[in-house]
Amino acid sequence: MFTLIENQIEEYCEEHTTPENGLLYKLNRETHLKVMNPRMLSGHLQGAFLTFVSKMLKPGHILEIGTYTGYSTLCLAEGLPENGKIDTLEIDVELEDMIREYFSQSPLNEKINLIIGDALEIVPMLDTVYDLVFIDAEKRHYTDYYKMILPKIRRGGIMLVDNVLWNEKVVGEINEKDFDTKEIMEFNDMVQKDNSVRNLLLPFRDGIMMIEKL
Ligand SMILES: C[S@@+](CC[C@H](N)C(=O)[O-])C[C@H]1O[C@@H](n2cnc3c(N)ncnc32)[C@H](O)[C@@H]1O
């Protein structure tokens, strides 16, 4: 739960960040009006952060796990060079029509490859080497995603993993049955011990683990 001052800071930051473009604004609004769990959407600040990272890296290939309504996909796609591609994976078939409708309205549509299905089944079949990966799906599989995807990232490539502070639960008392929190803590510890990467746990929004493959 955010405190009043945290909400004010977030509003202040949003007021001092380049506004969302028209399509992102519309998608953000429609997601909040029509889709379950709209808090899952990255939103203005995190979206702007993803765009910044992508524009700085200019990745040829991006992989995203957890498209939801496509907000973060559109933000990440901003940094793709002319022949760049983003593969974005979403397990929920119910979201497909809305995602495709929004992607089709974007000038970046040609660069986006939406794959509907379970990332745990699909990723092993992808034979692309990725420059940038954004993981934002089922928390209970974070360590599985990491082990499966790290070999597919080039040296010097970057993985961003969302929600690693899990509403600050990673520093509180843990309920034995809170498997999501346990998994995220296990994931954070695993990355911290992995000598094949350099990492930064950025306390931005719900926590983003930034990982560079060495
Ligand atoms: C937090 S939302 C993603 C939000 C989105 N990245 C954004 O910023 O707008 C997580 C999404 O991951 C999807 N998901 C969960 N498990 C998945 C899996 N195994 N493979 C693909 N997608 C999955 C869920 O259906 C949900 O839409």
Image: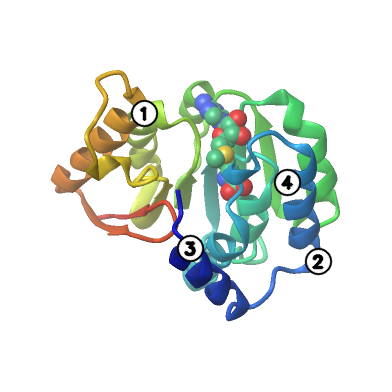
Give the label, 1 or 2, closer to the camera.
1
Residue that numbered label 3 is attached to: 4
Residue that numbered label 1 is attached to: 180
Check disc 2 and report its element: helix, strand or loop: helix
Neighbourhood count class around disc 2 (C-alpha, 10 Å): few under 14, some 14–19, many 20 upward: few
- CA separation, marks 1 and 4? 24 Å
- CA separation, marks 1 and 3? 27 Å
Residue type at tag 3: Leu
Q: Earlier in the sequence, mark 3 or mark 4?
A: 3
Give the label, 1 or 3, closer to the camera.
3
- CA separation, marks 3 and 4? 21 Å
Q: Nearer the viewer, residue 145 or 17?
A: 17
Check disc 4 and report its element: helix, strand or loop: helix
Q: Earlier in the sequence, mark 1 or mark 3?
A: 3
Residue type at tag 4: His
**Residue 21 in picture, x, y percent from top left:** 75, 69
Q: Residue at x 66, y 26 (%)?
A: 92
Residue that numbered label 4 is attached to: 32
Mark seen at residue 22: 2
Answer yes or no: do the residues labelled 2 and 3 have beta carbons within 8 Å? Answer: no
Q: Nearer the viewer, residue 167 or 160?
A: 167
